[in-house]
Image: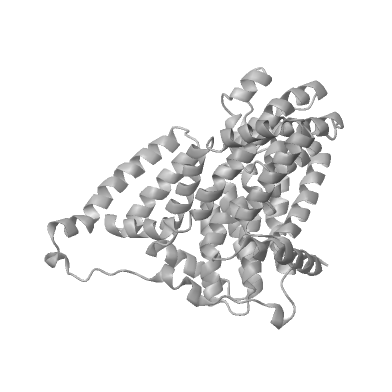
Amino acid sequence: MIRALGNFFTKIAKKWIPDAFIFAIILTILVFVLGMVIQGKSFIDMTSYWGGGMWSLLGFSMQMVLVLVTGSALAISKPVQKVLKTIAKAANTPAKAIAIVALVMGVGCWLNWGFGLIISAILAKEIAKVTKGIHYPLLVASSYSGFVLWHAGLSGSIPLSIAGKNAVMEKFAEGAIIPTNETIFSVQTLVIVIVLLVTIPLINVLMMPKKKEEIVEIDPSIFADDEKEETVAKSFKEMTPAEKTENSFVLALIVGVVGIIYAVRYLVKGGSLSLDVVNFIFLILGLLMHKTPINYVKAVDKSVRTAGGIVLQFPFYAGIMGMMVSSGLAATFSNWFVSVSTPKTFQLFTYWSAGLVNMFVPSGGGQWAVQGPIMMPAAKALGVSYARAAMGIAWGDAWTNMIQPFWALPLLAVAKLNIKDIMGYTTVILLWAGIITSLGMLFL
């Protein structure tokens, strides 16, 4: 049955799902029309909301580019490549390979979503090179499937933001501060995480093609450009002073040591693993792993080539978010779910509404800005804890990433696949994760 579902959704995806950029354009048009039809806004109003929001996420989009570039540059360093190749050799059967990449992604994203997203993509590529008979689109889909756990982990933006002073909480929840033992480390969240972490690899394995002719193996030549290494033709003595500076390990070491001291002191003092801190750690470790400044420059240059999708599409999603918020569409969607909620079902309906809103606003911070001001007062009125309401939004934000192609862009860039190649399989994970999480919210 699981295999049949995977095949069914894959056929639909290959026929109907366009490139991720076209998906963003279609969503833009859809929200534009809904704003006029449902909210009664004029064409000019929607135009203003779209244009006004388009550049509102430039800072965040640069963070996203750096997550991809610094993470990828670190992952292609020789020490990290050795570790990944060792793991890849252990994945010596298709079933093992699919289970391992899903597990690595799940654990990696629970620790930090940026790290998990890049490492699992590189690992999938390495596994595909050495493991014969593996269905590559399913392998890549499996390496993305664990991303559904990110917002219940240590880098979850909503639970981390409400653990300190938060503008939404100060305005709509009397300045309440919600400790992480009520969100990330609550019994409900941990049980859902463990169940999904154990079962998602199994679901992916059950989707493996049975017939040999259905298996699409990787063509190693597609990664040929990624693996070209530029070697220094001259010995160190023959280099010019400029070339010696470029190839100086001492310079990399000085920056690396200072960076490590800063990072350790920051974390020991209780600093959180924000995106900026993760990017800083990736950058410093990448510089050290590549040993010389010029080697790191070349690694970053290779990695930048995979960031085109984020650079192109983020302004469109920022424009969509501008229309959703300014037109009142996001509030309308959220308020409808609130209106049919009871104290028992409030978290569940919050989760479902967040999953819907995430299709148009695929950003944890953006999701909180849209839904937090609506859901927090509603939770108080119904007698539901702020922690449960916040985690409903957080889980919903992560849930529909399985069919929202935006966050798959870095992984697809590394794997050299299109969203239509994996979305059939991730749709099955969407259904499974939705069932498990919904049950958890109702009965835990």
At a point 70% along the width and 40% down the height, the residue shown is 32
**Quadrant occupied by the N terminus:** bottom right
Quick one: quadrant of the C terminus? top right
**Whole-percent x and y of residue 383?**
80, 24
| Residue 143 picture location, percent across and down | 61, 61
Residue at image coords 71%, 41%: 31
Residue 171, quarter of the rendered image: top right
Q: Is residue 250 left or right of residue 322?
A: left
330 relative to 82 in the view: left or right:
right
Closer to the camera in the image, 307 or 7:
307
Tell me which residue sits at (77%, 25%) in the image. 378
Q: How is the model colour-coded?
A: one colour
The answer to which of 202 and 41 lies nearer the viewer is: 41
Please say whether residue 189 is visible from this viewpoint.
Answer: no
Res. 65 in view: yes
Relative to residue 321, is residue 195 depicted above or below? below
Residue depicted at x 37% and y 58%: 301
- Residue at far top of view: 174
Q: How many marks overall?
A: 0
Residue lying at the far bottom in this picture: please name it. Answer: 212
Classify 175 as above or below 144: above
At which x and y percent is residue 337?
Answer: 82, 34
Residue 175 lies left or right of residue 68; in this view the side is: right
Residue 194 pos. (x, y %): 69, 51
Residue 255 in the image: above or below residue 375? below
